[in-house]
Amino acid sequence: MEDCMVKHFISIRDLTPENALSLVRRAKAMKEARHFSTLLQGKVLVLIFEKASTRTRISFEVGVRRLGGQCILMTPAESQLGRSEPLEDTARVLSRYNDGMIVRTFGEEKLHQLMQYGSIPVINALTNEGHPCQVMSDVLTMYERHPDLSALNVAWIGDGNNMANSWIEASIRFSFALTLACPQGYDPDPALLDLAREKNARVTLCRDPRQAAAGAHYINTDVWASMGQESEQRAREKAFAGYCVDAELMRLAQPDAKFMHCLPAHRGEEVTEDVFESPASIVFDQAENRLHMQMAIMEWVFS
Ligand code: CP
Ligand code: NVA
């Protein structure tokens, strides 16, 4: 997304199909070359994290350093964010010192406020509505194994959450088939399902995890209660019973199907220990690819 010459990375749906694929190709090349550069030399990126993070924060910090830049972490507990200073003001102040904002927050509207009032690029590091850096990294993880993404069947089993939404956007952009199995009441964003229909994307929503798993090349899941939904844990355990990815479900998929999870995982809930630890599990390749994909995204945003 471009706004008065400032480039932002907010969602996969904002990318053109060519742009999306070139980011994946660039990330693969950067990974293979163990890429370092001076692109961000003299630049400071502020990481505004209103939710916990291991992978996103550390992979961004490493990526910024590999591109020659520096970063500063800002959390609500240790800044005026936690004392309700308006984002409009925070955005204008931070834009006077920094060259970019990498933001993990609750509602996506907060990113829009930061873009509107700030004057530097904003990169989405997860919101309630999407997790585009993760899903772009996951697409890279599939692309390394199957360069013809349009030939793939991908299954999403579980909550129609931020990850599921970004997977729908990825299906539209990269043309792979996506079947989501979500319990009633936990569907992904209906506007994205409409967009998928409008774009003739192969996105199917069903209730039966077995339908989603049948013939899949990749089976994906995520926690049943996302950050901010901890109080719903019990109710969600009931609603999601039957949606655990286990060996029986994996057997319905392609013979060499892979298991994917953005992590952190709750073994014994959304995935069994044996599937998580099986050779079919590529969860740590996904985690590694966060670094390479985000370096490609930052290169695109700051070039
Ligand atoms: N997958 C992911 O975003 O992990 P973190 O919450 O640890 O950043
Ligand atoms: N859906 C999860 C993803 C964590 C990386 C959450 O939002 O907590």
Image (cartoon, rainbow, N blue to C red):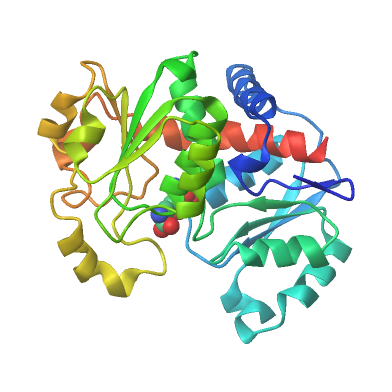
Q: Taking 47 as reference, is 301 above or below it?
A: above
Give the tally of numbered discs: 0
Task: Please indicate whether residue 8 sits to the left or right of residue 194 in the image.
Answer: right
Task: Please indicate whether residue 23 sits to the left or right of residue 266 in the image.
Answer: right
Residue occupying the point 53% across, 66% down: 106
Relative image position of residue 43 (x, y in whole percent): 83, 48
199 or 66, which is in the foreground?
199
Question: Is any atom of residue 256 visible in this view?
Answer: yes
State which quarter of the image contains the C terminus: top right
Res 77 quadrant in image: bottom right
Residue occupying the point 79% across, 64% down: 116
Q: Taking 104 as reference, is 204 above or below it?
A: above
Question: Is any atom of residue 54 visible in this view?
Answer: no
**Quarter of the rendered structure image containing ligand 2:** bottom left
Relative image position of residue 300 (x, y in whole percent): 75, 34
State which quarter of the image contains the N terminus: top right
283 or 258, which is in the foreground?
258
Relative image position of residue 141 (x, y in whole percent): 46, 26
Task: Please indicate whether residue 244 sits to the left or right of residue 45 in the image.
Answer: left
14 or 6, which is in the foreground?
14
Residue occupying the point 28% across, 57% down: 224
Q: Taking 68 as reference, is 285 above or below it?
A: above
Residue occupying the point 58% across, 21% down: 28
Res 25 quadrant in image: top right
Residue found at the very far left of the displayed protein = 248
